[in-house]
Amino acid sequence: MNNHTRILLPLREKVSAKPTDEGSKDASRRNATTKRARALRRTQPATERILWKLLRDRRLSDFKFRRQVPIGPYVVDFACFGRRLIVEADGPFHDPAADAVRDDWLASQGFHVLRFSNVEVAAKNRVLGQIIEVALAPTPKRPLDPSSVSLRLTPSPARGEGS
């Protein structure tokens, strides 16, 4: 390239960094969920520490797990996004009705949720076997987000559609 050749970059719409009135509620909810996840990481119960030792650093069949992850309005104990798998260590204070609502919402987002009681976590090999079995199963398809569907009738080469 010589010095006189110009490379034209695509024009982009400027976006304000300030939250709008509409988005400020969502942003504050996200911030609260993130703060709650950070606090949960600092005060992890013994059963979650046991599971984390087994899942961290790709120790379980090279699956990448993250702990205390905010997903939507919830914070899940362990998540493997590559396999759309969530592992929950249920202590003695879990509400089955609330857990059912939470599990239904997570399933609607394409996640498979595994729940283990403290007694089950103590039998590590059985728990790890179940996690591997579900992780190796075919990954569920994520539901289609209606906002991601293009409403155009003709493809746009500028967007990489068509030829």
Image: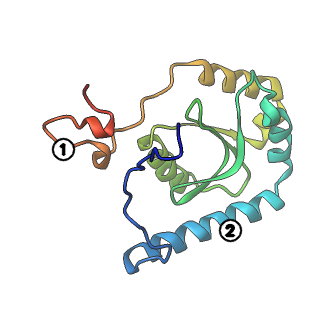
Q: Where is residue 137 in the image (x, y as percent from the top left)?
A: 55, 19
> Badge 1: how crowded within 10 Å, few (<14), some, or many (20+)?
few
Of tags 2 and 1, which is closer to the observer? 1
**Left or right: 122, with 106 as reference point:** right
Q: Where is residue 28 in the image (x, y as percent from the top left)?
A: 54, 74
Q: Where is residue 96 in the image (x, y as percent from the top left)?
A: 56, 51
Residue at 33% x, 34% y: name it. 160
Residue at 70% x, 28% y: name it. 63
Residue nearer the viewer, 64 or 94 = 64
Q: Does 121 sit above or below residue 4?
A: above
Q: Give the Cα distance between marks 2 and 1.
A: 37 Å
Residue nearer the viewer, 88 or 12 = 12
Give the labeled residue for mark 2.
35
**Left or right: 44, with 31 as reference point:** right
Residue nearer the viewer, 128 or 35 = 35
> Badge 2: how crowded within 10 Å, few (<14), some, or many (20+)?
few
Of all residues shown, which one is farthest toward the bottom?
21
Of all residues shown, which one is farthest toward the left?
153
Residue nearer the viewer, 132 or 56 = 56
Kind of residue sitting beneath label 2: Lys
Q: Position of residue 84 (x, y in %)?
A: 55, 34
**Left or right: 70, with 19 as reference point:** right
Residue at 46% x, 28% y: name it. 140
Q: Do the residues labelled 2 and 1 touch (CB within 8 Å)?
A: no
Earlier in the chain: of badge 2 and badge 1, it is 2
Give the labeled residue for mark 1.
151
